[in-house]
Image (cartoon, rainbow, N blue to C red):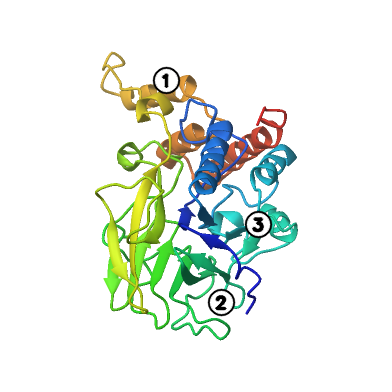
Amino acid sequence: MSDHNSLSSFQGLLFIGDPHLEARIPGFRKDNYPHVALQKFRWCLRYAREHQLQPILLGDLFQLPQDNPNWLLSAIIESIDEPLPAIYGNHDVRENSLKPHDSIHVLFAGGHLKQLSAESPWIGTVGGQQTVVGGTAWGNRIPKEFVSDCVAADLVVWVTHHDIFIPGYEEAGRVRPGEISGIDLVVNGHIHRRLQPVSKGGTHWVTAGNITRRARSDASREHIPAVPFLMSADGTGADDSSDVFRFESHSGQSWKIGWVTVPHEPFDDVFHPEVESDGSDGERGSGFIADLRQLTARRTDSGAGLNEFLKKYLDQFEVPVADEIMRLAAEVTSDKSDNHNQNRDS
């Protein structure tokens, strides 16, 4: 176990959930998503620095695992002052494990990100308490116990990027929260909602939520981009709110988790509205016409509108024809992704 972080001292930790940075505009967003998402990521790092918080990345830094343009990689590198402790998420890797062709591998190899694991945790002082932060990336098993063999930790935090079976996410949850010996707090990314913490014995499970809204949906409309911070119960310096979760670590120390809202625009200023049919096209085919009108009016770089439209109406074609249409659509949207935003100001 490495202890090269042992001299680091902070007021708290700040957990950054799922930035999903990319060079194209997704899912009916009408703003400059590449710029906006990058600015949110930078805001989190700046906020952590200004409030003496150690930032931790919970995975899915990227939306696409590979072939991200150099301007985006350069902008990320320029934003990170010190190695950022991180795990990778499912969007960061093309397979279920890290490979050399994945963009995030470049950041790990270059020392801009520090990959967290059981063997290589972050170790430092948080609120005057010796703290260990380990991690389990996407596709790996969360440990059933953790034993710190190198430092007497007052607090052990674990970050994950998994489908956790949390109230509010039962439909996709696969890993059930439980008490993990030696781990006080688990902070999970991956789930794009902020859900209520769950306590199982001495282990407390927190769902961070994400900092960017990618899809036009009711869930996105209700979601407030935010990042959770961890501080000692009597700590000051970060914006606090009435919505605070408090717990005790195995050492008897009291801690609190609060959420800081990430600056963002109102939902209706970010996403194109759905185009509703006025009925003037007649009962037969009116839905098709309305959807076609929406497709032509609300084009997105990722082809979200086209793919949504095709999936809705392709069942009227034979399977080979439908498959060929989807193949051509994927080819077109891929070409747009390769050529879009390479010279955009970051």
Q: Nearer the viewer, residue 316 or 313?
A: 313
Q: Name the amino acid, label 3.
A: Pro
Residue 333: horizontal and vertical position, in percent? 61, 36
**Residue drawn at x 39%, y 36% as measured from the top left:** 216
Q: Name the amino acid, label 1.
A: Arg
**Vertical position of residue 331 compared to residue 246: above or below:** above
**Distance between mark 3 and mark 2 Cα atoms:** 18 Å
Residue ID for mark 1: 293
Between disc 2 and disc 1, the foreground one is 2
The dot on residue 118 is 2
Between disc 3 and disc 2, the foreground one is 3
Q: Is 197 left, or right, of 291 in this rendering? A: left
Q: Residues within 10 Å of mark 2 (few under 14, many from 20)?
A: some
Residue ID for mark 3: 83
Q: Quadrant of residue 337?
A: top right
Residue 214: horizontal and vertical position, in percent? 46, 40
- Quarter holding the N terminus? bottom right
Q: Are marks 1 and 3 in contact (CB under 8 Å)?
A: no
Q: Nearer the viewer, residue 3 or 187?
A: 3
Q: Are marks 3 and 2 in contact (CB under 8 Å)?
A: no
Residue 67: horizontal and vertical position, in percent? 70, 46
Of the image marks 1 and 3, the number of the one nearer the N terminus? 3
Residue 129: horizontal and vertical position, in percent? 45, 70
Q: Quadrant of residue 342?
A: top right
Q: Name the amino acid, label 2.
A: Ala
**Residue drawn at x 32%, y 77% as measured from the top left:** 202
Residue 251 in view here: yes
